[in-house]
Image: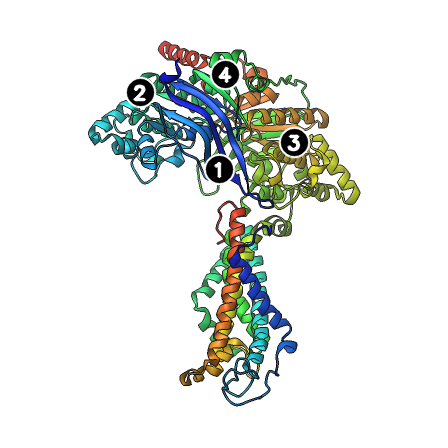
């Protein structure tokens, strides 16, 4: 691969921004510090990194664009040999949407809800190529077909809200391909999708790339996803390149510690607890619906949880798993069924529960930043349950706060910080401490790691497991992430459309024979190996041929 | 927090501070007494009467200084009342919801559907005319605006996870309203406070001008405009001076309110104040 044949050449790219902290002078920071790479025609480069690594910023810089106050301060971006950073505004307009296109993470937010899909798909191509509407519509229909969209002839006549999220993401890819660009920048195109949808979109994107021979930058935080689609990978951290190599080399023999950590993420082992005791929590035949809608969200759901064990409730968005958590906490009263705790039934609504009932059952949320009052210090946040449930004050309270901070591996100096002064992982740790402060027997964890970067999430899971051993607390773990479930669960309930379709100890649930849905769910989770996607698709073809 | 105060806000702070000093130290700053007749009718500005005299021959500057005291005091008290009432009820309506919210919100809609000035004129002409009545009427009528703002801000905050966490902990309404929601609703409310204060100054001035506010011989700016308005026909500027004072106070408080609003908008990541 000669340098002069490369479609995109990025040379020593430097990107900066000015930050305006409320209590200090504005100052400049460097987001990307001297990144270089070549991308030849028809190849796919994966950009990997945690949030803040600079991967999206680099992706947008290949369109000569800096988002919200971001400035490209140095280096060159050569597209087909021209430095697009030095082109004027008019020339850049000509490049964007014709030579290089962008596929954003949230297709739902990227489409205009007031226009038909077809008009939006061919808009950029009409603007730049001057081809007739009929020709472009035909091309779009062909793209819809190759992306595996149902009804390719007429799906373009629909409005964005009339198709599903996965379909919308594929239509956005068609939009990018419609102008027949040389390069497409994919910015986390499957991150917002459920795993079973992600696999279809991923396969569709990969086929489209292969058929059209377009080059692509594929940005993601999920190494296993990128491994299925990229020829080369570049691992970024804090705006610097950590490692750059072929996908095979990065996955199978990473040279750097950081890359190795990313590859080995979720390798936590948790032996399944098997001892049977009287159950701590019994959910009996719960049926529930939201006020004003007759359609039940939960139908006849029954699960049990032993003291000190972990029950994982797995399902996709809309499966009712979070609603189950709301019923157990008392936020939503079920229309039928009961929840028993320690052998005694809990009141269906919050107002009927005693303070001790409430204390025994704590909750940790997905978004730690909105789960803490931004105007309270960590001391108030952790200290309030201590005063509220145990009447602790003064020295005793301070001592206990420091103990709790220690148990979540934070120093005593964190007590006087506000949530805004903590990192994402630290915020979630403080939420854990707030739950622990009540000395509960059960903690409901609602997607607690899904908003975190993989390495940070691993740290949180390890902490939760340690705390479980020490405090003998039971967890009800609501999640869509099978890897998390494998790492921490003792028993698993798989939910689909408001019902529990599979339930039992981890070893049974995760071993064949599977029911159809669990099989689909488990086989859709990307694995950290090259060629996994090909195998899955080949298997599915064989199965459907066999039927 | 006060890292850089923009020039406009500096100006606003300076002028407002001058008005406040004049109001607080009125008896020491005023060269003559409030009701003392010291010269002829509508004497021009001179070294003895810096702003001239009014329609009865009283020193205009002294009356302006005493008027600042009355105007600012009543407006401030009415703002305080409207804020306490409006924000407490607004926050409670958002937290309690249901019939309580419906009842209160529809009642507020009813009050707001009647033009404020006309409503105030009717009520004030029936009730005994003293300071307390005036403050009560101004405060209660204005609290409807604060109620709507407080409620809409609190409804947003009420659905956040940290409020749910407090409810799950078993906290009572008192804690949820004053410890979880109020601190987060404070910034838009404080910005609104400045604007409401200006409206109270204008409202009081309008009432006094129409003869239902402060009664003579007490001085307030609106009443002074009324007393001296006939002078305009003879080319005498005495009525314009209190009018100018009203505008300058309004503008300078507005400059401060704008600055606070901008700051809180920055902190909230683009959420507007209303």
Helix, strand or loop at label 1? It is loop
Name above or below for residue A450 compared with residue A199.
Answer: below
First of labels 3, 1 by sequence position: 1
Distance between mark 4 and mark 1 Cα atoms? 36 Å
Badge 3 crowding class, 10 Å Cα cut-off, few under 14, some 14 to 19, many 20 or more, is many
Report the residue marked by disc 2.
A146
Q: Position of residue A276 (x, y in %)?
A: 67, 20
Residue A527, disc: 4
Q: Nearer the viewer, mark 2 or mark 3?
A: 2
Q: Do the residues indicated by labels 2 and 1 lie within the same chain of the protein? A: yes
Q: Name the chain letter of the residue that bears numbered label 3.
A: A
Q: Nearer the viewer, mark 2 or mark 1?
A: 2
Q: Mark 3 highlights which residue?
A: A442
CA distance separating discs 4 and 3: 32 Å
Residue visible at 68% across and 26% down?
A468
Element at badge 2?
Answer: helix
Q: Position of residue B109 (x, y in %)?
A: 46, 61
Chain letter for mark 2: A
Mark 2–mark 1 CB contact (< 8 Å):
no
Sequence-earlier tag: 4 or 2: 2
Disc 2 and disc 3 on one polypeptide chain? yes
Q: Are marks 4 and 2 on the same chain?
A: yes
Q: Secondary structure at mark 4?
A: loop
Q: Is residue A213 left or right of residue A449?
A: left
Vertical comparison of B28 with A492: above or below: below
| Residue A289, label in figure | 1
Between B207 and A239, the one nearer to me in the picture: A239
Front-most of residues B32 and B134? B32
As drawn, A505 above or below A361: above
The CA span between labels 2 and 3 is 49 Å
């Amino acid at each position: 691969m000669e340098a002069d044949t490369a479609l995109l050449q990025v040379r020593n790219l430097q990107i900066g921004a000015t930050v305006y902290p409320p209590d200090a002078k504005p100052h400049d920071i460097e987001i990307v510090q001297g990144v270089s790479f070549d991308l030849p025609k028809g190849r796919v480069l994966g950009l990997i990194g945690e949030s803040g690594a600079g991967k999206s910023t680099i992706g947008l810089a290949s369109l000569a664009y800096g988002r919200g106050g971001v400035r490209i301060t140095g280096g060159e971006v050569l597209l087909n040999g021209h430095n697009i950073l030095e082109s004027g505004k008019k020339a850049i307009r000509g490049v964007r949407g014709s030579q290089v296109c962008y596929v954003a993470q949230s297709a739902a937010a990227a489409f205009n809800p007031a226009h038909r899909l077809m008009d939006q798909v061919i808009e950029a191509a009409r603007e730049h190529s001057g081809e007739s509407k009929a020709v472009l519509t035909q091309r779009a229909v062909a793209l819809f077909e190759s992306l595996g969209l149902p009804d390719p002839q007429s799906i373009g006549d629909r409005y964005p809200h009339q198709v599903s999220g996965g379909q919308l993401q594929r239509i956005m890819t068609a939009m990018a391909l419609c102008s027949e660009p040389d390069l497409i920048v994919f910015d986390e195109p499957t991150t917002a999708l459920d795993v079973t949808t992600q696999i279809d979109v991923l396969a569709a994107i990969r086929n489209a790339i292969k058929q059209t021979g377009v080059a692509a930058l594929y940005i993601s935080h999920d190494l296993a996803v990128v491994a299925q689609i990229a020829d080369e990978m570049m691992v970024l951290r804090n705006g610097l390149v950590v490692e750059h190599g072929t996908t095979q080399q990065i996955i199978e023999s990473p040279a750097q510690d950081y890359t190795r950590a990313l590859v080995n993420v979720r390798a936590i082992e948790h032996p399944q607890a098997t001892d049977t005791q009287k159950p701590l929590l019994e959910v009996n035949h719960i049926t529930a619906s939201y006020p004003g809608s007759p359609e039940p969200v939960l139908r006849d759901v029954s699960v049990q949880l032993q003291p000190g064990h972990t029950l994982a409730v797995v399902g996709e968005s809309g499966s009712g798993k979070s609603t189950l958590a709301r019923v157990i906490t008392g936020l939503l009263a079920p229309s039928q069924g009961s929840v028993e705790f320690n052998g005694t039934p809990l009141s269906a609504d919050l107002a009927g529960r005693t303070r001790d009932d409430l204390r025994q059952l704590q909750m940790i949320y997905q978004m730690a930043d909105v789960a803490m009052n931004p105007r309270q210090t960590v001391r108030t946040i952790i200290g309030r349950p201590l005063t509220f449930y145990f009447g602790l004050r003064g020295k005793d309270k301070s001592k206990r706060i420091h103990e709790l901070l220690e148990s979540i591996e934070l120093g005593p100096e964190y007590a006087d910080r506000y949530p805004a002064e903590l990192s994402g992982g630290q915020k979630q740790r403080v939420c854990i401490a707030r739950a622990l402060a009540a000395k509960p027997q059960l903690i409901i964890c609602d997607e607690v790691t899904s908003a975190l970067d993989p390495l940070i999430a691993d740290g949180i899971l390890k902490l939760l497991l340690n705390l479980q051993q020490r405090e003998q607390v039971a967890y009800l773990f609501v999640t869509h992430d099978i890897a998390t479930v494998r790492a921490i669960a003792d028993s698993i309930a798989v939910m689909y459309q408001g019902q529990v379709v599979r339930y039992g100890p981890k070893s049974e649930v995760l071993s064949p024979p599977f029911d159809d849905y669990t099989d689909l769910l488990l086989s859709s989770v990307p694995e950290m190996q090259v060629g996994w996607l090909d195998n899955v698709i080949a298997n599915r073809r064989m199965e459907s041929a066999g039927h | 927090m006060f890292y850089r105060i923009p020039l406009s806000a500096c100006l606003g702070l300076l002028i407002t501070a001058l008005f406040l000093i004049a109001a607080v130290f009125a008896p020491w700053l005023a060269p003559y007494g409030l009701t003392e007749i010291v010269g002829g009718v509508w004497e021009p500005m001179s070294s003895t009467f810096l702003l001239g005299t009014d329609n009865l021959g009283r020193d205009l500057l002294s009356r302006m200084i005493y008027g600042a005291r009355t105007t600012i005091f009543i407006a401030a008290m009415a703002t305080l009342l409207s804020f306490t009432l409006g924000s407490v009820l607004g926050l409670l309506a958002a937290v309690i919801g249901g019939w309580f919210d419906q009842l209160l919100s529809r009642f507020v809609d009813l009050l707001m559907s009647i033009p404020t000035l006309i409503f105030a004129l009717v009520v004030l002409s029936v009730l005994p005319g003293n300071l307390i009545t005036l403050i009560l009427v101004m405060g209660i009528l204005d609290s409807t605006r604060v109620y709507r703002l407080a409620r809409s801000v609190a409804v947003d905050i009420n659905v956040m996870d940290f409020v749910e966490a407090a409810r799950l902990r078993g906290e009572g309404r008192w804690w949820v309203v004053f410890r979880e929601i109020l601190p987060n609703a404070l910034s838009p409310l404080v910005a609104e406070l400045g604007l409401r204060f200006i409206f109270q100054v204008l409202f009081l001035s309008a009432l006094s001008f129409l003869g239902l506010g402060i009664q003579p011989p007490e001085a307030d700016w609106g009443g002074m405009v009324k007393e001296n308005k006939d002078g305009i026909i003879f080319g005498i500027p005495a009525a314009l001076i209190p009018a100018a004072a009203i505008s300058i106070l309004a503008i300078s408080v507005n400059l401060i309110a704008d600055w606070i609003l901008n700051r809180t908008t920055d902190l909230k990541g683009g959420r507007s104040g209303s």
